[in-house]
Structures are given as C-alpha cells and as structure tokens.
Amino acid sequence: MVNMSYCRFQNTLMALQECADNLFDGELSEEEERSRKRLVKLCAKIADEAEDYDDEDEAKEPSWRDYEMEDEGYGKA
C-alpha cells in the first residue's frame, strides 16, 4: 500500500502538486516520460468522473488552482 487510508488524499495531493509544478521541467527518462503521460491521462479521467460528483456543500466546482500548495501546509490558495 502506497498511502495509509487516513492520509492518502493529503499525501497524494502534495505529490500531485509537485508533479504539476514540474510537469514540463527538464529531460525525463523514457520510463518517466511514459509515467508522466499516464499520470496526465489518469488525472483527466478523475476530473471527468468527478463531474458526476454532487456535493451540496460546494458552491462551485473546484479547479486545480483551488488546491495549490501554500507556503505553510496545503489547502485552498
């Protein structure tokens, strides 16, 4: 198991933010480039499926920018 259930979304959010910040930086190995492409496709799939998510507490659909990391911790910018 990569993440424990009690912190999987926190840890994944931080890792995804790091990936987003470096999405087009530097030269990648072939394996890392394949993983980057797969990650982008998976994120698109998650975003597409999330459109069906209905949360009455949310006034608007969040964008990825709503979840950018702040200097101290994480959360909405």
Image (cartoon, rainbow, N blue to C red):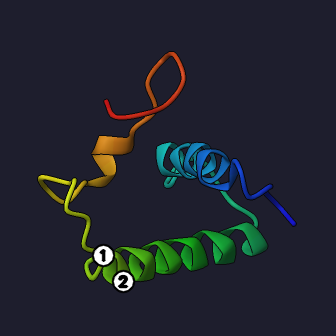
The x and y percentages for residue 2 are 83, 61
The x and y percentages for residue 52 are 27, 82
Kind of residue sitting beneath label 1:
Tyr
- Give the distance between the C-alpha atoms of the residues marked 1 and 2, in whole angstroms: 7 Å
The residue most toward the top is 72
Residue that numbered label 2 is attached to: 49
Quadrant in which residue 62 is drawn:
bottom left
Q: Is residue 3 left or right of residue 68?
A: right
Quarter of the image containing the C terminus? Answer: top left
Q: Residue at x 52, y 78 (%)?
A: 42
The x and y percentages for residue 30 are 74, 74
Q: Is residue 38 left or right of residue 30?
A: left
Q: Is residue 1 left or right of residue 66?
A: right
Quarter of the image containing the N terminus? Answer: bottom right
Residue that numbered label 1 is attached to: 53
Camera-side residue of 63 and 58: 58
Q: Secondary structure at mark 2?
A: helix
Kind of residue sitting beneath label 2:
Glu
Q: Secondary structure at mark 1?
A: loop
Q: Residue at x 19, y 62 (%)?
A: 56
The residue most toward the right is 1
Mark 1 nearby-residue class (10 Å; few <14, some 14–19, many ≥20)? few
Q: How many marks?
A: 2
Camera-side residue of 39 and 46: 46
Q: Residue at x 51, y 54 (%)?
A: 23
Task: Say whether marks 1 and 2 touch (CB < 8 Å).
Answer: yes
